[in-house]
Image (cartoon, helix red, strand yellow):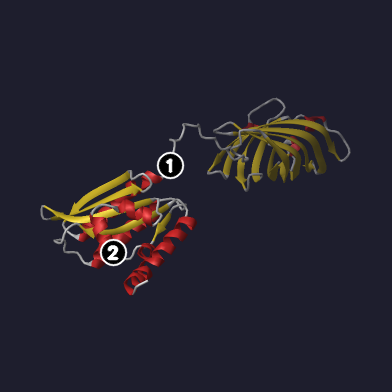
């Protein structure tokens, strides 16, 4: 082997080895973005500017294509095909497909910058190397190289998107409705719980004095949109003094209140209480007139602490046995309590 042939062999043997290893190891989804070149000698752009345009085209390919596609870098391509006059001539003659096949790239781009009407123009084409089909292209013109860079950023994405599979349009599937949070004041279902109250009571019978009042029992909360219906079933007791003697009344109370809640926290309630006396005593005696208070008007405030816990304060004004007005009755109870809903 003479020196001339040997030098040529040394020049091309790395190319052959790289091509063979590339064919064996690189996946089929390889994209080569070849250098953008001048279309004529009248293009007054620097080598650095051409490289920057090419680098931007590679960035757009990487940002657009799925991760399964391998984008060859400039070093990859230079290692496979040394940059010499033959490469430039081949690109100028639009044989990018042949270059893509030589470096085992399945897809390849080629681009040129020319002059037209005193303006710079750029054209980029995107090919499938196996059959030479052009998948997409774009062209743009500008007064300067910055406009060409902006055109690459704007127009290259639709071109590279030709490789992405078509995504079927979304079907009009009705959105699944999320369940509404269940709270004590907005729940569409009734919730049950426990309550306990304590306060003071005053009996209008025989000029009775104030004493202690207490209640405990079950509570329910049912939402009707604008207001809550809050009935209760309580075991209640009052202890006070009548005619300087200790008196007590044990009864079952059924308060029926409607409650309006503001800002999910503060509530105002109005309603009535049905009272069913179980026993009444004055120092061991059973006064018949102490058992006949059975209906009261009620009103109060409530504060919602959590979805399950609230406190309330209320006042109950009892009617007399002949159902005279509340104003004429001297019997009443003021209570403060706490409620818990399961």
Write the residue at 38% across / 63% down. 80
* 126 is higher (above) or lower (below) than 53: above
Write the residue at 36% across / 62% down. 77
* 31 is higher (above) or lower (below) than 215: below
The quadrant of the rendering that contains the N terminus is: bottom left
> Of residues 3 and 132, which is closer to you in this image?
3
* 255 is higher (above) or lower (below) than 334: above
> Of residues 158 and 36, which is closer to you in this image?
36
> Of residues 126 and 202, which is closer to you in this image?
126
Badge 2 element: helix
Q: Which mark is residue 51?
A: 2
Badge 1 element: loop
Determine which residue is flagged by label 1: 165
Write the residue at 24% across / 67% down. 47
213 sits left or right of 128 in the view? right
Q: Position of residue 25 (x, y in %)?
A: 49, 57
């Amino acid at each position: 082997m003479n020196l001339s042939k040997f030098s040529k062999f040394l020049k091309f043997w790395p190319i052959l080895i790289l091509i063979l290893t590339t064919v064996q190891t690189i996946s089929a989804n390889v994209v080569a973005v070849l250098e953008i070149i001048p279309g004529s000698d009248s293009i007054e752009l620097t080598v650095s500017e051409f490289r920057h345009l090419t680098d931007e085209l590679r960035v757009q390919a990487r940002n657009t294509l799925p991760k399964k596609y391998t984008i060859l870098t400039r070093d990859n391509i230079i290692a496979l095909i040394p940059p010499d006059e033959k490469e430039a001539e081949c690109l100028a003659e639009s044989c990018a497909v042949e270059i893509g096949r030589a470096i085992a790239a399945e897809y390849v781009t080629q681009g040129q910058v020319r002059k037209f009407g005193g303006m710079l123009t750029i054209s980029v084409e995107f090919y499938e190397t196996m059959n030479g089909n052009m998948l997409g292209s774009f062209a743009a013109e500008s007064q300067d190289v910055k406009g060409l860079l902006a055109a690459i950023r704007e127009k290259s994405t639709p071109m590279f998107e030709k490789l992405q599979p078509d995504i079927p349009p979304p079907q009009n599937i009705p959105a699944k409705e999320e369940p509404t949070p269940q709270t004590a004041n907005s729940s569409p279902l009734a919730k049950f719980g426990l309550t306990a109250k304590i306060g003071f009571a005053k009996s209008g019978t025989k000029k009775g004095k104030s004493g202690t009042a207490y209640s405990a029992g079950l509570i329910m909360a049912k939402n009707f949109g604008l207001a809550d219906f809050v009935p209760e079933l309580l075991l209640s007791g009052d202890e006070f003094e009548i005619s300087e003697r200790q008196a007590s009344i044990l009864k079952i109370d059924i308060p029926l209140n409607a409650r309006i809640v503001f800002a999910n926290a503060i509530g105002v309630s109005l309603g009535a209480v049905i009272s069913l006396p179980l026993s009444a005593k004055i120092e061991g005696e059973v006064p018949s007139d102490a058992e006949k208070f059975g209906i009261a008007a009620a009103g109060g405030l409530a504060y919602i602490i959590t979805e399950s816990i609230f406190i309330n304060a209320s006042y109950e004004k009892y009617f007399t046995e002949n159902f005279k007005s509340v104003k004429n009755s001297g019997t009443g109870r003021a209570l403060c309590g706490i409620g818990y809903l399961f």
